Amino acid sequence: MSTASAPPSLPAGRYGRPQRPSRRWRRWAYAVVAVAVGGAVAWIGYLNLGAAPITAERVTFQELPGNAMTVSLNVTRDEPGRPGVCIVRTRDISGAESGRREVYIPPEATRVDAVVRSIDQPVTADVYGCSYDVPEYLSRS
């Protein structure tokens, strides 16, 4: 004679509610979202902080009469056939910007000279930045 016995039951309220099955899919979903967000941040950082496709370096500058300065630039770019634009500025004795000019960089050009007018006597000049986004008023088609 065999009697089937039921498994022993736990006293009610003594051990809390029984645990639910594990939800590992949530962990995987969070991990996938974290990797995607991290990849997007890395890509945006690379685009904004990576090597610029067009750069210019000031080679010489010379003061001209009438609060002006001539600046010579060496241009380096990854696509020599594309025109570009560089912003060149002059600074006065206090270091404040006293003049600024957008300089058109023709295709295939590696050296460009520009005259920048200043509101005060300029003492130095530098390149603020360069881009392939040439404004329409500056392009020479």
Image (cartoon, rainbow, N blue to C red):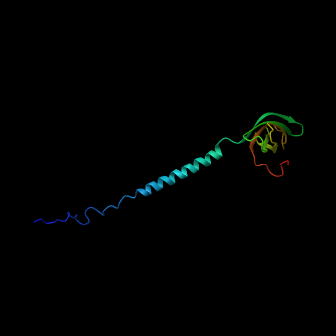
Outermost residue toward the front?
1
Total labels: the figure holds: 0
Instruction: Please indicate whether residue 50 sits to the left or right of residue 60 in the image.
Output: left
Q: Is residue 14 above or below residue 66?
A: below
Instruction: Please indicate whether residue 120 sits to the left or right of residue 130 in the image.
Output: right
* Quarter of image, res 66: top right
Outermost residue toward the right?
65
Residue 94 visible (yes or no)? no
Residue 26 visible (yes or no)? yes
Q: Nearer the viewer, residue 74 or 108?
A: 108
Q: Dividing the image into 4 quarters, which one contains the N terminus?
A: bottom left
Outermost residue toward the left?
1
How far from the left and from the top, in percent, is residue 104? 82, 44
Instruction: Please indicate whether residue 137 sits to the left or right of residue 24 in the image.
Output: right
Q: Nearer the viewer, residue 55 or 70?
A: 55
Q: Nearer the viewer, residue 140 or 55?
A: 140
Residue drawn at (89%, 37%), measured in percent from left and top?
65
How far from the left and from the top, in percent, is residue 120? 83, 42
Q: Is residue 120 above or below residue 40?
A: above
How far from the left and from the top, in percent, is residue 37? 55, 52
Q: Nearer the viewer, residue 106 or 98?
A: 106
How far from the left and from the top, in percent, is residue 79? 74, 41
